[in-house]
Amino acid sequence: MSADKVTIADVARTAGVSKGLVSFALNNRPGVGAETRVRILQVAQDLGWKPSLRARSLSTQRSFALGLVIARNPEVLASDPFFPSFIAGVESILSTERRALVLSVVPNEETELQTYRSLVADGRVDGVFLSDLRHNDARIPLLTELGLPAVTLGRPDGDSPYPAVTVDDTPGVTASVRYLAELGHRRIAHVAGSPNLLHGTRRREAFAAAMAAAGLPEGQTVETDFSVGAGSDATRRLLGQAIRPTAIVYANDPMAIAGLGVAHELGIRIPEDLSITGFDDIDFCRYVFPPLTTVSAAPAVWGRAAATTLLHLMEHGRADDVDLPAARLIIRGSAAPPARH
Amino acid sequence: MSADKVTIADVARTAGVSKGLVSFALNNRPGVGAETRVRILQVAQDLGWKPSLRARSLSTQRSFALGLVIARNPEVLASDPFFPSFIAGVESILSTERRALVLSVVPNEETELQTYRSLVADGRVDGVFLSDLRHNDARIPLLTELGLPAVTLGRPDGDSPYPAVTVDDTPGVTASVRYLAELGHRRIAHVAGSPNLLHGTRRREAFAAAMAAAGLPEGQTVETDFSVGAGSDATRRLLGQAIRPTAIVYANDPMAIAGLGVAHELGIRIPEDLSITGFDDIDFCRYVFPPLTTVSAAPAVWGRAAATTLLHLMEHGRADDVDLPAARLIIRGSAAPPARH
DNA sequence: GCCGTCGACTAAACCGGTATAGTTGACTAA
DNA sequence: TTAGTCAACTATACCGGTTTAGTCGACGGC
């Protein structure tokens, strides 16, 4: 049982060299004799020396931690399994790198910006993940001003100095629409996500484009904030009309599941009377009835890629954009040809 | 625009005092003349001095951060909104305290213990939240060995030196069973959670006790790992029997929702042919059909209380247990009197 | 034989705070 | 008058690394 307070000075003393040389040897830098280096490393190992992160932080001005700030309303956050999975992916990379993840969950966008500032002021993190990109996202200029490395989850709409790790939503939405069109649907509606969020509008645009490409009339679209409740309301609205859509493409799964509930409640059978598709392929999809046809994302893979890219950026000063395999359609039981009449 | 590198030495120089005195003044400690103190604080403010967390960390051997290590299989983590809400609650406290949350998501229990060790070795955190308590939880002796303050979410089964912040599950389960019994159900089954997790077995015991108290025969119980998939399987098993239960009490909402799906698939109507209840009151509950009768927890409140307690413990060396309002039954539409025959 | 260069290594400053041992001067008690 | 006490304040060590300036000896070129 060692008292566990081995410092670099202890190593230096027992190895009979100076403190500085030990530091050189341990960070394998030139200027240390081969034989001496081996001896130093050996002594360090024998003594059970562990570098002090705190001391290193102070002298190198780094924190060896990455940050993730989430600004979502609690309801959306709670029902969307994106972040838990994404974080699990991030961690799978960080854990091998002796780096930590600092997480902040904030109630709104003002505190979000404030949080980035204080994260930097306190030197808590060396880089951050930028998720839930918004139009003309204020975080990008802020972070450049603060000089904080970052990776964006998806491609921002304005200029960005940061590498983007992207999963293209478009093909998934397009495939959904095409699939429904091929089944014979013509009146297809879209329950869109938040217009403030880039992936909300991207999916929406993809929907409109796909409708046009399929030669269908413009589909009805209703905006939401991505929450389950909003998905429910939107569905109720769509289905309460005199002539209603025969299919609905939802911008995420929680809303689609809420839509399923509304349909059941109204006695509208799925998929006989109404076809629906979701987006994200959360676990629930396989277990609701009928199982939800949806578009797979892969948040954990995304997390791994984002972490790898961010680390690379921090180490080498630059990193390439990464395009992950596009989301693709998972066909289950929630869509069928429209009823004849 | 100041160059933003104001140190305590700068303050000392402009105030015409020594470095140490500035430190005393800023941490308002005795030994500083009233007038001098005011002057020092004024100078610090004028210069825009911000304490360096890193320097303070090194000299005080503290990190001003709290840790949360989550060891859950990805599927359970993703479908359970407990942590996002809990974390939001924690953050609402931490953000006012200039403290950060370090999050680790690990795949299994061995790496979990290892993670605590390295969190301490690296001095990343000053205290941790212990969630998902297990029987004879190995983390408790580990943390005491490591000398790390902690708060347990729920009361552990063995000895624990740590304050517990608890939401009593029992009344909620009891209320569910009594409610179903009053509706006339006699064959009530339980889809239990993981037997390794304390709250899994506690809910299960509460179920058994409540059945006995209601004068009902012992209910059938099937164990799961709390995942949606397991909930689905368990339901399928229960409903596949010759004589099947007329009601099922689920240990959490995701499994109950999966159960709903299975029932629909089998053409079993809810609540006419089968009554079900969940646990946790996740957002989905209100939006599935029929809306799920469940037991409310309040993860965000729990998070706030846990954070407050942990901070108190760290500051004063001790903290009292906190018992939060017990979970209570939320009656919606997924239960009704059993069908006659 | 002498100077210049180079690699190996040491001493000490530095990062920015906190903590401790002293110093000083005013006030008090004997 | 003088030693003793105490508050106010200074100087300095310290946390545990990194980094820079500089020392020393060997070796090569002329």
Image (cartoon, coloured by chain):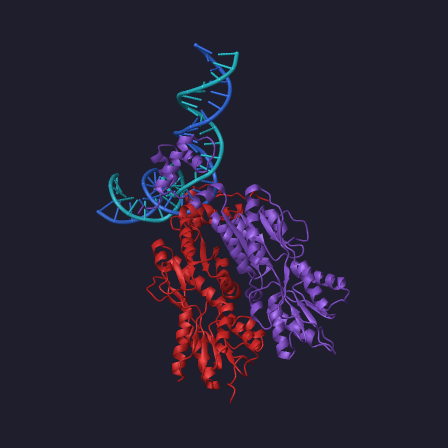
Chain colours: A purple, B red, C blue, D cyan
Work out whether residue B42 or residue B145 is closer to the camera in this orientation and state it: B145
Residue in the picture at 55% in, 80% down? B270
Q: Residue visible at 53% across and 52% down?
A: A67
The residue nearer to you, when weighing A209 against B219, is B219
The furthest residue to the bottom: B341
Q: Is residue B335 above or below residue B53?
A: below
The answer to whether one can see residue A200 in this image is yes
For the image, the number of numbered tags is 0
Rendering quarter of residue A255: bottom right
Q: Position of residue A161 (x, y in %)?
A: 64, 47
Residue A168 falls left or right of residue B223: right
Residue that sits furthest to the front in the current view? B242
Residue B99, given in percent of the width and then of the height, sits at 47, 55
Across and down, in percent, residue B133 comes to 40, 64
Position of residue B140 measured from the top left corner of the image (x, y, whole percent): 36, 60
Q: Nearest the camera: B164 or B178?
A: B178
| Quarter placement of the C terminus of chain A | bottom right
Give me the residue at 34% from left, 46% from top.
A4
Q: Quadrant of residue B171?
A: bottom left
- Asked if B160 appears above or below A29 in the picture, the reply is below
